[in-house]
Amino acid sequence: MARSIPIVTSMGESFLVIANRVGGIGILFAQILKRLRPSLIDRAETMRNLYKMAVKSLPIVVVTALFTGVIMVIQAAPIVKRYGAEGLLGWGAGLGTLREIAPLLTALMISGRVGANNAAELGTMVVTEQIDALRALAIDPIAFLIVPRFIGIVVTLVTMTIFADALALVGASYGGYALLGVAPASFMNGLTNGLLDFGDVAHGLIKSTTFGVMIALASCHFGLATKGGAPGVGDSVKVTVVTSAGGIFVLDYLVSFVLG
């Protein structure tokens, strides 16, 4: 009985920590939604964040997407060869890429690059009292800092997912030609012969939107909640990456379950 008490206490503490974090993220989301009005959005800050988050993320997304397409073909190659189903290679690679692989891998890449960087920047502003200075100047930190970053992360993830979809399919088509001798034209015919439609693309884009919201909220919340100087900034980045990755997989399941 005595041993069970510390376990129950630990479980209770963990539950309270999770509840505190979920509640804090929910409150931040409500504050962001309240300020999502054109008159309150700092356009210069938004454009700066879009350049930093989207444009500078493009090279790593390009490399990841191209190799993702080739990997999809490598995984499908044994079955295609066994059953002579070269005509279905485009459909098989396209379905997995558009609905699952491209949104998921792109979200994980953006989480590691953009989400972690965003949490570090905000955490540094907190520990150096820059956030307090904004409040002293009667500048709303949520409207000036958080809303542009929220918009930047969500738009970045959706845009990068569209790039990843296209590039992964290009990589898969030429990978299929190199590994299986399936001409790119035949691959594209299998991709567009009616088995895939815009619904499959929309499925992936809906996922990427929810992933973007998750990454933006986690990175902004933990960045603003930073305490303890430089070590606290490191802790905020660590918690942001872990929370974002876990949230991405949970949301992936929920959206797949709801949309089918």
Image: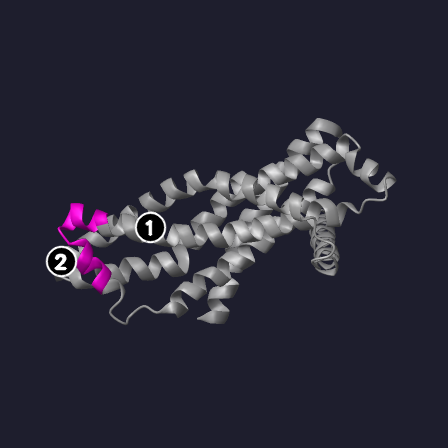
Helix or strand or loop: what does disc 2 sit on? helix
Mark 2 = which residue? 82
Based on the picture, tell me whether residue 178 belongs to the magenta stretch. yes
| Left or right for 39, reference 106 | right
Above or below for 130 versus 108: above
Main secondary structure along the magenta-highlighted residues: helix
Q: Position of residue 220 (x, y in %)?
A: 67, 45
Q: What residue type is labelled 2?
A: Arg
Q: Position of residue 211 (x, y in %)?
A: 54, 55
| Left or right for 214, reference 208 | right
Write the start and end of the magenta stretch as one range. 174-189
How packed is label 1: few (under 14 Cα within 10 Å), some, or many (20 or more)?
A: many
Whole-Å distance between the Cαs marked 1 and 2? 24 Å
Mark 1 = which residue? 168
Tell which of 15 and 194 is nearer to you: 194
Residue at 73 percent across and 34 percent down: it is 125
Q: Are marks 1 and 2 in contact (CB under 8 Å)?
A: no
Based on the picture, tell me whether residue 76 belongs to the magenta stretch. no
Q: From where the camera sits, is residue 2 visible?
A: no
Q: What residue type is labelled 1?
A: Ala
Indicate which disc residue 70 carries: none
Q: Position of residue 74 (x, y in %)?
A: 24, 48
Q: From where the camera sits, is residue 46 visible?
A: yes
Q: Where is residue 235 in the image (x, y as percent from the top left)?
A: 66, 35
Helix or strand or loop: what does disc 1 sit on? helix
